[in-house]
């Protein structure tokens, strides 16, 4: 499900925000809030649009995170070779 995928993705965010709160906890709270605020939606087209948009956003975040992770590892490898 989309919600479980969001929770799995949020686990990768280990650092804290400007208030010292872990990002993974903040992302989980925000996801829960979004799902709760949408739970009474009955229009199938709106629900489908929300799901497609949510999945797209999660995919984009995963891709950006993976790109940054690969770049960090590449930098580490370059530094080791010096």
Image: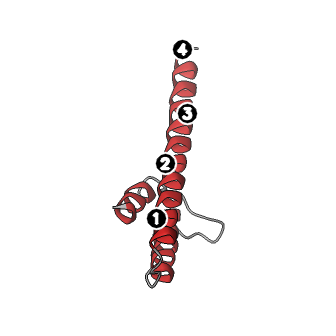
Q: CA distance from mark 1 to mark 3?
A: 36 Å
Residue that carries the numbered disc 2 in the rendered image: 59
Nearest the viewer among 82 and 13 is 13
x and y, in percent, of residue 75 in the image: 58, 26
Who comes first in sequence, dot 3 or dot 2? 2
The secondary structure type at the circle numbered 4 is helix
Q: Which of the image's four quarters has the C terminus?
A: top right
Nearest the viewer among 40 and 59 is 40
Q: CA distance from mark 2 to mark 1?
A: 16 Å
Q: CA distance from mark 3 to mark 2?
A: 20 Å
x and y, in percent, of residue 62 in the image: 49, 46
x and y, in percent, of residue 78 in the image: 57, 19
Nearest the viewer among 74 and 38 is 38
Who comes first in sequence, dot 1 or dot 4? 1
Q: CA distance from mark 3 to mark 4?
A: 14 Å
Labels 1 and 4 touching (C-beta < 8 A): no
Rate crowding at label 1 as few (under 14), some (14 to 19) or many (20 or more) other CA atoms within 10 Å: few
Q: Give the colour scheme of this rendering.
A: secondary structure
Q: CA distance from mark 1 to mark 4?
A: 49 Å
Residue pictured at 39% horizontal, 65% vertical: 3
Labels 1 and 3 touching (C-beta < 8 A): no
Name the mark nearer the viewer: 1 or 4: 1
Q: Which label sits on residue 48?
A: 1
The secondary structure type at the circle numbered 2 is helix
Residue that carries the numbered disc 4 in the rendered image: 81
Who comes first in sequence, dot 2 or dot 1? 1
The secondary structure type at the circle numbered 3 is helix
Rate crowding at label 4 as few (under 14), some (14 to 19) or many (20 or more) other CA atoms within 10 Å: few
Name the mark nearer the viewer: 3 or 4: 3
Q: Decide: is 74 above or below 8.
A: above
Residue that carries the numbered disc 3 in the rendered image: 72
């Amino acid at each position: 499900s989309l919600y479980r995928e969001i929770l799995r993705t949020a686990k990768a965010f280990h650092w804290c925000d400007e208030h010292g709160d872990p990002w993974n906890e903040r992302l989980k709270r925000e996801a829960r809030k979004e799902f709760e605020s949408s739970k009474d939606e009955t229009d199938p087209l709106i629900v489908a649009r929300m799901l497609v948009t949510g999945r797209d956003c999660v995919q984009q975040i995963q891709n950006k995170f993976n790109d940054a992770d690969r770049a960090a590892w590449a930098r580490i490898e370059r530094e080791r070779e010096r």
